[in-house]
């Protein structure tokens, strides 16, 4: 029976060599001659080790699991198209992409071996594969601005037509980094299975008769998909239950030791949770601490950190190391100061919940703040009160906001904040936070900076 082993968004798994080893050990234990090992993006970045190795640590993983196919996620371009091309050329899997175009309009990294689609004969069945990336990637990743991400559904439909015209396939599998766009992919394109990524919540679902699975983030889960004639069966595997691949563990430990980020910057009494469940639920200690660091370094009125920019992992502390700080925001973006009107700041705060953002899950909370307080009504899905420095925001006044350069670039998160608001640039984010931790400390409490209420919706 043909089987697929699916991982995605493993991101900072490499910062914990034992966890990465168990992920690889799980894949290897399940792999056999009738199995293909496939990924659906964000498997080279971000993470501390990824930042140091510029994605090169993923080459160890691809070799260890004997990976067959991969597609691009938005973070696979974190170190620029040139580096992405190098990784494609050096890595074991065949990279499939039908909607990423290079600077000249051709298929991205075609010279390095990418293909628009692929087929594989396995245990009596012929399977077709397409790979597709979120079209907003150039709007969310500043390093991808010179690339074009075409309409994913038109690109997949065209690729599937080519597959079915040239090969008598039994099933077509989409390796998708579309996140919430997977439903439309299943409805609009002639695919038989969607192996998804991008959104970090796990999924095992069927849409219009098409199974969709998503393993979540950081290598905790892989999906085994069994194709038995017209029946597709999905099986979830927790990687922590498998013995580690010791050769991968050793290779990654060597890379971690060479990074030299183990020095302790400060100590806190209670470790701070940084899980996605905590960070995306509202005010949290680690979000407050990061936003405080931004305001401290810039003397801005408000510090703002997006939840998606805080990467999940083990709790921070009691010893706070340089590696801990880098792992929280493992990006090369700078801290910037933006100058906005009070009306614009209210619009920025108004995009603090997922339903307004159009990014991530509808209930996600996206804003962590310093120097300000927000009262949010969940039922009305809007800000009902907002303060800076203890005073209500004046729509006509000017305020300074310290945040990441990414948020000025992105048109997906906090769209009211743009490059036109740029008023200053500082160090790289994690360098600022590390300096704050060394000089001030790195701790915060829940202080009521974000108050969430649930009133009855206002009547017409």
Image: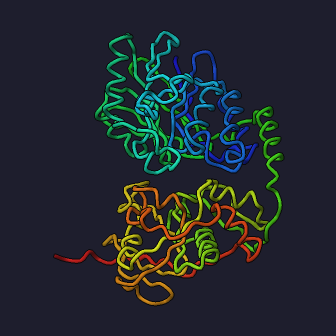
Nearer-the-camera pick, 419 or 377: 419
Q: How is the image coloured?
A: rainbow
Q: Residue placed farthest to the bottom in the image?
A: 391
Quick check: can you spot residue 290?
yes
Rendered image quadrant of residue 377: bottom left
**Residue appearing at x 38%, y 40% in the figure:** 182
User: Is residue 83 positioned above or below 401 on the image?
Assistant: above
The percent coordinates of residue 47 (x first, y second) are 65, 49
Q: Is residue 25 visible?
A: no
Q: Quadrant of residue 158?
A: top left
Q: Is residue 145 above or below residue 436?
A: above
On the image, the x and y values in percent for residue 322 come to: 76, 60
Residue 222, by quadrant, is top right
Q: Quadrant of the C terminus?
A: bottom left
Task: Tell me residue 416's x, y (percent).
Answer: 38, 66
Q: Nearer the viewer, residue 388 or 101?
A: 101
Picture residue at 79% right of the left edge, 55% below the top = 261
Describe residue 346's horizontal placement relative to residue 110 as left or right. Answer: left
* 83 vs 302: above or below: above
Q: Residue at x 37, y 26 (%)?
A: 192
Q: How many marks?
A: 0
Q: Residue at the spot x=65%, y=64% of the render?
A: 427
């Amino acid at each position: 029976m043909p089987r697929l082993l699916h991982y995605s968004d493993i991101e900072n798994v490499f910062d914990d060599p034992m966890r990465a080893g168990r992920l690889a050990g799980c894949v290897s234990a399940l792999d056999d001659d009738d199995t293909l090992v496939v990924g659906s993006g964000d498997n080279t970045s971000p993470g501390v080790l990824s930042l140091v190795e510029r994605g090169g640590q993923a080459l160890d993983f691809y070799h260890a699991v004997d990976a067959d196919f991969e597609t691009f996620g938005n973070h696979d371009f974190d170190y620029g198209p040139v580096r992405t091309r190098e990784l494609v050329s050096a890595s074991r899997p065949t990279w499939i992409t039908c909607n990423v175009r290079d600077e000249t309009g051709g298929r991205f990294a075609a010279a390095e071996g990418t293909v628009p689609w692929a087929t594989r004969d396995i245990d009596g069945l012929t399977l077709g594969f397409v790979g597709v990336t979120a079209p907003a990637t150039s709007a969310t990743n500043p390093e991808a601005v010179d690339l074009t991400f075409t309409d994913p559904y038109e690109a997949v439909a065209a690729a599937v037509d080519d597959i079915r015209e040239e090969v008598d396939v039994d099933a077509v599998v989409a390796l998708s980094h579309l996140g919430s766009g997977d439903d439309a992919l299943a409805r609009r394109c002639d695919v038989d299975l969607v192996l998804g990524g991008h959104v970090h919540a796990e999924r095992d679902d069927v849409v219009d008769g098409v199974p969709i699975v998503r393993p979540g983030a950081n290598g905790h889960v892989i999906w085994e998909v069994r194709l038995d004639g017209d029946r597709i069966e999905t099986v979830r595997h927790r990687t922590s239950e498998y013995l580690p691949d010791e050769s991968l563990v050793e290779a990654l430990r060597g890379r971690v030791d060479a990074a030299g980020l183990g020095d302790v910057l400060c100590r806190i009494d209670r470790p701070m949770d940084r899980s996605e469940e905590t960070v995306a639920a509202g005010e949290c200690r680690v979000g407050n601490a990061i936003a405080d660091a931004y305001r401290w370094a810039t003397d801005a009125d408000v510090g703002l950190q997006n939840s998606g920019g805080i990467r999940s992992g083990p709790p921070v502390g009691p010893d706070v190391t340089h590696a801990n700080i880098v792992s929280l925001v493992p990006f090369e973006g700078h801290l910037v100061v933006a100058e906005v009107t009070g009306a614009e700041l209210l619009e920025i705060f108004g995009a603090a919940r997922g339903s307004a953002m159009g990014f991530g899950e509808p209930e996600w909370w996206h804003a962590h703040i310093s120097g300000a307080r927000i009262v949010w009504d969940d039922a009305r899905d809007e800000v009902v009160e907002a303060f800076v420095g203890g005073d209500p925001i004046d729509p006509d006044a000017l305020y300074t906001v310290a945040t990441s350069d990414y948020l000025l670039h992105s048109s997906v998160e906090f769209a009211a904040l743009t490059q036109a608001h740029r008023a200053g640039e500082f160090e790289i984010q994690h360098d600022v936070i590390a300096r704050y931790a060394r000089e001030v400390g790195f701790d915060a409490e829940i202080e009521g900076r974000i108050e969430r209420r649930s009133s009855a919706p206002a009547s017409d």
